Amino acid sequence: MSAKILLESRQLVKRFGGILATDHVDFTLPEGARHALIGPNGAGKTTFVNLLSGVLTPTSGEIFLDGVNVTGWSARRRAHAGMARTFQINQLFADLTPLETLVLTISERENAGWSWFRPVGSRADFVDEGMALLRQLGIEDIAHGRVGVLAYGKQRLLEIAVALAQKPKVLLLDEPAAGVPEHEREQILDVVAALPDNVALILIEHDMHLVFRFAKSISVLVNGGLFMEGTPEEVASDPRVRKVYLGEEEVNV
Amino acid sequence: MTDIALSHRPSPEAQKARAVLLGRSRWGVAEIAFWVIAAACYFLLPTKLSLLSEIAILGLLALSIDLVLGYAGIVTLGQGAFFGVGAYAAGLAAKYGAGSAPWSDPVIGLFIGGGFAALIGFITSFLVLRGSDLTRLMVTLGVALIVDEIVNQTKWLTGGSDGLQGVLPSAVLGIWDFDLYGKTAFIYSMVVLFVLFLLARAIVKSPFGLSLQAIKGNPLRTRAIGMPVNGRLVAIYTIGSFYAGVAGALAAQTTQFASPDYVAFHRSADALLMLVFGGAGHLYGGLLGSIIFRTMQDVLGNITPQYWQFWLGATLVALVLFVRGGILGLLSGLRDRMKRKGDAA
């Protein structure tokens, strides 16, 4: 069980004024991980993901990606080093088509994004890979429509497809099923369950059904700090977790 | 994961998808017709060649804004500055290089004008990387005001408010002299416009061009997929400045004059207005807009010399309020509607 550590945070802190949004978090993610990050609203889950992916700069502490200290790196550089993420609220290109979006992402990954003389689509291998991804996610029928007018569930799937097109080592999924209507939810759960084994996954999720179906390990964040870590069974049976988190869930139901 | 697919021949669906993508850069009938008509104007409107050259030059200026604003989403009110820099640089090259070939050659002058404008554009591009649309509007406007003032104050070089006199470009490539009827000027302007249009067309249909549209759509995501957003914006802003500089150089050469009017605020505002008229983000918007703008100015100016700006303003307000995306937006909307009707039938 000594798999290579792909992502690590050491004593990570983020302050917004007087608020401690991330409180000295030590976190490790081994190769092939299926890790869920849970916690009540305002626990700092999205802040933590923004720190890992480089959208936010930490107040103190360090982040290592595949053994390299990336704390001062931009989101762009981390992306090239193998970090991909999806967003809680769709961040897509409304005026492009899904296929264009993927071909664009692949060109950037292959450092062909500066190419200015040959038209988009002249690289057959990029188009083929983009179509294969759309097929993998079951949305190849919408390859040429405008992204802005797609159904919300399809856009959520495209979010995942874009991240996969980066061929990441670490993939951060920020509430992939958030806001998706019930009848489209199953498709997203299937896609998440079928993600490639060689990618280490972090799932941030409110939906306990999805968490317990998918995760092999769970971290619970409360008030920005790491509250506990363990297998799904350990977390589910821990009375303190039940009190701060699962209990609250029952009240909501 | 997806590597498996790569080792095989592309699937039929992938080949079809590729054809769809490549089809977007194919020439349409309307496009070809546009350029054929533009060329035919030489024979159809022989008495209006000077006006047509001016339209081509304004169209090139509006095209430069389309690259920056229509594709990359950088709001600018300062494109006139690069037009002016290009005009004065090419004008001075023609004035002081007169007789000493090749420096007085207009084609060299275009590169001098475009090059100087691109240099200023590159330097000031770092100011428009950050900030909201309003910030960018103010920064580009501020740069244009500075250039305007420099032109007015360096009287020893630019002639100040009297304008730059004695701009006498030699024959184009040493062969075609500028004539009184504006024949050479028209053909020269049209060829330059067409060549730069082809280049712009290649750029916007390329992966680089697509990345600009992505940045316009969602900068957060472009950074997350590892795109060098700032580098791309610097590049297109510099290219746009080059285009505006070449337009200015053309103006100085064909009118044999450069004046502070070329860098004045209304130059930037008019060009932006033309682009909005025609529709941003189609490449043809600025060209159509310049035709309509100058024609309206000409026709309305003859009918109601005092009030032509009133009608221009009224048309602009109506267009912006009732038709999103200018004339080309209106046309593509109609085309989509007809297509849908056809599909339903």
Image (spheres, coloured by chain):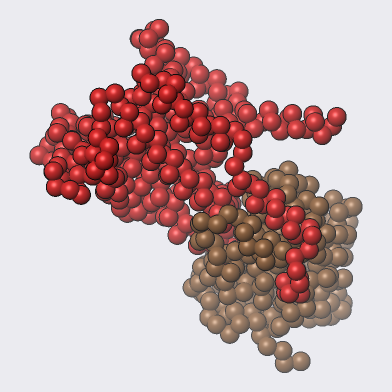
Chain colours: A brown, B red
State which quarter of the image contains the C terminus of chain B: top right
Which residue is depicted at the point 80% across and 31% down? B342
Residue A237: give x, y in percent of width and height: 87, 77
Q: Is residue B39 left or right of residue A216?
A: left
Residue in front for this viewpoint, A214 or A18: A214
Q: Residue furthest top?
A: B303
Counting the numbered discs, the total is 0
Residue A123: give x, y in percent of width and height: 63, 62
Which residue is depicted at the point 70% across and 50% down? B20
Residue in front for this viewpoint, B85 or A187: B85
Q: Residue furthest bottom?
A: A2
Q: Residue furthest front?
A: B175
Residue B29: give x, y in percent of width and height: 61, 35
State which quarter of the image contains the N terminus of chain B: bottom right
Residue A235: give x, y in percent of width and height: 82, 76
Which residue is depicted at the point 70% across and 83% down? A30
* Whether residue A76 is visible: yes
Residue B222 vertical placement versus B20 (above, below)? below
Q: Quadrant of residue A6?
A: bottom right
Residue B126 vertical placement versus B57 (above, below)? below
Which residue is depicted at the point 37% across and 34% down? B187
